[in-house]
Amino acid sequence: MLKFSRYSLLSKLNLFKLTTREYCGSDDCEKSAFENIKTLTPQGISRLTNLFQEDKNENKVNLGIGVYRTEENKPYILPVVKKCALELVQDPNLNFEYLPVFGNPEFTKAASELILGKDCKAIEENRIVGVQTISGSGALRLAVEFISQHLKKRTCYMSDPTWKNHSLILKHAGIKTLKGYPYWNDAKRNIDISNLLAALNEATEGDVILLQPSAHNPTGMDPTKRQWKQIAQVIKERNLFPFFDVAYQGFASGDPDRDTWAVRYFVKKGMETLIAQSFSKNMGLYNERVGNLIFVLKDANHIEAVASQISILIRTNYSNPPAFCSRVVAKLLTDENKKKEWLKTILEMVDRIKKMRKALTNKLKELETPGTWDHIEKQRGMFSFLGLPPNQCYKLLKEKHIYLLNCGRINVCGLNLNNIDYVAKSIDEVVRQAVSLR
């Protein structure tokens, strides 16, 4: 048996350390490769959700995260969506094989027709490519990577304000320059159409213009048909590239066809476009990540080349989309009875949102809250831009436990008959305090 003295063992260990340092050239080999990674503070909705969950106050109200809630403040599973899912589960032929790279063809066809209409000439002439994506965010990401790599666009205009994640996706997917076009007139609390058009007239040929056709996030204000025609005219005349984010189809008016009027108008005018589509909100499939990306081209001869390049982007991103809920959507949209049931449910959901808008507007008027509040009722979709400055939003959060974004956006679906009095009185109190300090 070999024996080592304590001294000789320590000497050998020290010699090993010295040899290691000499081999590495420094002490760096003892450091973690991750030690210089900076911790980011949760932002926006993630931060609000965390704070809300930690809050023990019994009066707390979550008006932040963009999900539909029932009058009882519960998550809502659309009955027809549940019905379709159960039918699929009970199907003896159900399997979990890979889908094609472009996803479920029955789904992409039905989803594309929902946006463009079954009578769309671009569909009839085979001038579109539909691609199943990882919800709307995934559709945006895939579209922007394609735009950046193949259309060589380096500047993108988006509404000011817009959904916070738009700028993050655009930057990380390769768009070098981001610019805002005026959208919200804070004084009049409506769309700033004159300055919007002026900004688009300053854009350079080929610039990308990101548009939300309905239930604008965060303002809840949508252009009229006349205003959409003005926007389309500038985009066409200046040869700009329209890019639509359709996250709330059906949630603005209760009619999916009406909510995509702008998209169909652009396509009818012969403009090429990309359309990101989500089924998170209008079918309640939030965590199932069901989306679609549509390429509308002028010339069918370019379809093969475009499709080949998209397939590479898909292959190197997520390879293959999830199958189950794409089948749910396809089943719903291709069965007339199920589709009718879905449309009826959408109307009921939108009706509840409208009632909450009207109730909040009326209560603020009854309280004689300083300012004007008619814009809340005029806005559409699940979001409302209250028009409150960040310091008042902060007071609502910290003192009243009402969780909303600091830009003043609230999710109207978070309101119900049990909390709307408290919310209205809290807004009234915060606004009055601000007025008294002027």
Image: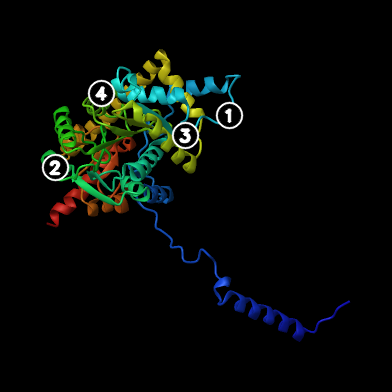
The numbered mark, 1 or 3, whose residue comes first in the sequence reads 1
Question: In the image shown, does 26 or 194 lie closer to the viewer?
Answer: 26
Q: Give the answer, above or below, for where 61 lies relative to 325.
A: below
Within the image, what quadrant is residue 410 found in?
top left
Q: Alpha-carbon distance for marks 3 and 4? A: 26 Å
The numbered mark, 3 or 4, whose residue comes first in the sequence reads 4
Residue highlighted by disc 1: 96
Residue highlighted by disc 4: 258
Q: Secondary structure at mark 4?
A: helix
Q: Amino acid at mark 3?
A: Glu
Is the residue marked by circle 3 packed among few (<14), some (14-19), or many (20+) residues within 10 Å?
A: some
Q: Amino acid at mark 4?
A: Arg
Q: Give the answer, above or below, for where 187 lies relative to 323.
A: below
Q: Amino acid at mark 2?
A: Asn
Q: Alpha-carbon distance for marks 3 and 2? A: 40 Å
Q: Alpha-carbon distance for marks 1 and 3? A: 15 Å
Q: Alpha-carbon distance for marks 2 and 4? A: 27 Å
Residue highlighted by disc 2: 201
Which is more foreground, mark 1 or mark 3?
Answer: 1
Q: Give the answer, above or below, for where 93 lies relative to 12.
A: above
Q: Are marks 3 and 2 in contact (CB under 8 Å)?
A: no
In the picture, the quarter occupied by the N terminus is bottom right
Q: Are marks 2 and 1 in contact (CB under 8 Å)?
A: no
Q: Secondary structure at mark 3?
A: helix
Is the residue marked by circle 4 packed among few (<14), some (14-19), or many (20+) residues within 10 Å?
A: some
Residue highlighted by disc 3: 288
Q: Are marks 1 and 4 in contact (CB under 8 Å)?
A: no
Within the image, what quadrant is residue 374 found in?
top left
Q: Position of residue 180 (x, y in %)?
A: 21, 47
Q: Alpha-carbon distance for marks 2 and 1? A: 50 Å
Horizontal side, residue 153 vs residue 38: left or right: left
Q: Position of residue 34 (x, y in %)?
A: 51, 63
